[in-house]
Amino acid sequence: MYKLLLCWRYLRTRWIALASVISVTLGVATMIVVNAVMAGFAHEMQTRIHGILSDIVFESHSLSGFQDPAWHMEEIRRAAGESIEGMTPTVAVPAMLNFQVRGQYVTRQVMLIGIEEATHAQVSDFGRYLQHPANRQQLSFDLREGGYDTTDSQAEAGESSRPALEGAGWPHRRMRVARERAWRERQQETEQGALPAAAPSETASPVRPVDHQVDAVLAATTPPATPPAADPAADPAAPAPPADPFRAAVPEQGRTMDPAREQFTGIVPGIGLASFPDAKGVHRFLFLPGDDVKITFPTAGTPPKVGTDTFTVVDFYESKMNEYDSNFVFVPIAALERMRGMIDPQTGVASVNSIQIRLKPGANLEEVRDRLRQVFPAELYAVSTWRDKQGPLLNAVDMEMAVLNILLFMIIAVAGFGILAIFFMIVVEKTRDIGILKSLGASAAGVAGIFLGYGLFLGLVGAGAGLALGLAITWNINRIRAAVEWLTGERVFDPSIYYFFKIPTIVDPYTISWIMAGAVAIAVVASVLPALRAARLHPVEALRHD
Amino acid sequence: MIEPSSPLLVQVRGVHKSYRSGDTQLDVLRGIDLDLEPGAFVAIIGQSGSGKSTLLHLMGLLDAPDAGEVHLAGERIDNLPSARRDRLRNTDIGMVFQAYHLLPELNALENVLAPLLVRYSMAAWWRVRSEAKQRAADLLERFGLGGRLHHKPRQLSGGEMQRVAIARALVAQPRLLLADEPTGNLDEASGTGILDALCELNRKDGLSIVLVTHDAAIAKRADRIVRLAAGRVETL
């Protein structure tokens, strides 16, 4: 009983010991904050990766893909139908994206993905990442009449960081076409007024800082004798032969199109390809929904040839994973199959190169994957879960967390040495009291118990204060960030780097209990040596101590 | 209070004790014999370094002799295992020191209760606590400290602290009270008060007391005086 009483009294009267516990408090608080932020970050990343990849990806080893996705989907359903919620075929090929910025052509390497607009959003979070509210409901590859979000729909409502999207859509397209036509008319007038001798050289060098496709279409419209060019990418003067396999599938082929009222096949590029945030966090766009871009891709033949087509941007895709946002480009799967020649001309059966599978909630990923691997030969098909796909990245994050935890636990261990030193001091200071207790019949174990109990109390106080501090910081971390940003005028957590608008946090009670238990254990272990020393004190010598 | 299982309460037989400090061996006690009847009041007197405090510590089980035996109520106690020694110290022996030796973190009442707090586990303490508190308060009342139960030692005078220490020594109802220069740090009047209290305990309650002092005047208050010199009992 005296142990408890004395522990309590020492706790209330020895402030120096509490000072030693501050390091435990800080260590515990830091560990809680770091773990919460890391867990939040990892979770955010996993959600995003998962949101992009669907649960299970069934793919062909070849870019040319496998034939007849419907049959494959039926087989997949037969193998593991009870756990499957939805499936959608996709075609993914590396490609080049080509667009014009201020008269200059910019080319970027992209991953061109053909998706089924009706079903793709069912197997992943794809729909959530679009910029037009109606597209988030149901994607359409038709250009919309404005209404794109001018704020980040995934961030908390804030200042409009994308004012450029205000006029995007048909209004932007009409305005651009009108401006180009006006520019072209003025150009023609100056040409007509110029020396006639300049005309042949002008036709010989058609390179002008004008959008090439509009130029092409207008050229086709003005002289009625010229054969019209539906494929604006092709040279208007030499229309492709009708034997072209992709050309055969294009409806209304040969008709002149009016870019102010019509669009090419719709395309949804990642937002990272089209925009960049400036210093104030406002997004500046290189092209907008309504603009046309060109894609160059390998065809499905052997060996692959290069195909090029023009698309009209209808929306942007923003998963906040920079790797994806600056790489993915989505187009309708049917159009891509046709352009790549993936449709068998005899049977009309299409090929795809992967099937994205979403499982029912609670289904076992690995189990379904293994069942599919048994049914489909590994030589032809690769079946993997989203975790398999992003294994190295997820492992790296886990590893980072483990290393950070070890390092931070070292801080608490250092705090343990502080407790050890201060406890030795207290034992020396309390030597006479220890003698008194022994003269009153306290056993060596009892005296040791006082100091062990004291260590336990201090550990609990330190860890408890650390818990409170850690949780307070974690729950207010975004407010703290805002305050630090306001104070220093620097961006502490730049969304353009991290693609998160808030610092994500997850407080895991299991982790916290481990941290607390570890901190308390260290405090107790640190008090063992001083406690043993106190227990071994000789009562007579202890009583003589001044 | 005293069980007369043996006619003698304390028997010290041929006790030797020496301390080493570096290369020199200091023989403090060189064969001491001492008998104490139940209810006796014995004063041990001697020069500084004559070994009187060491003898008291041996009787109080704070130290063990190098040779010789110490008996309490007929039972040899100097070679008991430490758990039994701790127990005996708690239940059968009360000690009062020159420097009071109160615990500074506890108030007067808690200091008096300390031996009982040491004796009982938490659950047992819960059962006996009101009785124990009453007994401690009564003892403090008896020594004239009824109004100072909740004062910390530093708020008390020397005489008051020593009276708290005596109350602490008595609260566990021991058979033997060992007092090591209890008046050494006190002025004449306070010292006399303490001595009066000890005499009264001996006469009224029949408590056996061993008092160590270097002051012959104080020793005269005892029934018997044992004089130590150079580690031996000096016969008078």
Image (cartoon, coloured by chain):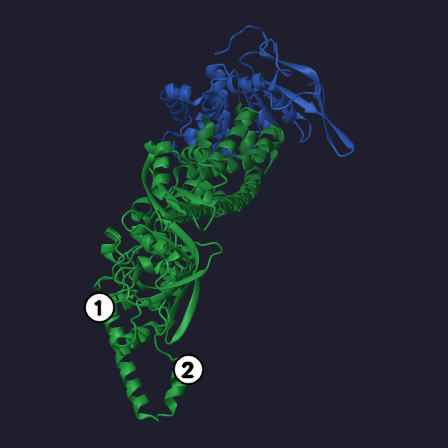
Looking at the image, tell me whether mark 1 or mark 2 is earlier in sequence order.
Answer: 2
The chain coloured green in the image: A
Colour in which chain B is drawn = blue
Q: In this view, does B181 lie to the left or right of A504?
A: right
Taking the view exactly as shown, the residue that stands out farthest to the right is B23
Q: In this view, does A101 lie to the left or right of A153?
A: right
Asked if residue B8 is positioned above or below residue B61 in the image, the reply reads above
Q: Which amino acid does label 2 sit on?
A: Ser
Image location of residue B110, percent across then percent down? 42, 29
Secondary structure under badge 2? loop
Pointer 1 indicates a residue of which chain?
Answer: A
Q: What residue type is labelled 1?
A: Arg
Q: Residue at x 61, y 17 (%)?
A: B81
Q: Is residue B147 left or right of residue A174?
A: right
Image location of residue A318, percent across then percent down? 34, 57
Asked if residue A438 is positioned above or below residue A210 in the image, the reply reads above
- Residue bearing the label numbered 2: A205
Query: Which mark, residue B86?
Result: none
For this rendering, which residue is in front, A148 or A11? Answer: A148
Asked if residue A403 is positioned above or below residue A225 in the image, the reply reads above
Please identify, in this view, whether the residue under mark 1 or under mark 2 is nearer the observer.
2
Query: Which mark, residue A261?
Result: 1
What is the C-alpha distance between the residues marked 1 and 2?
30 Å
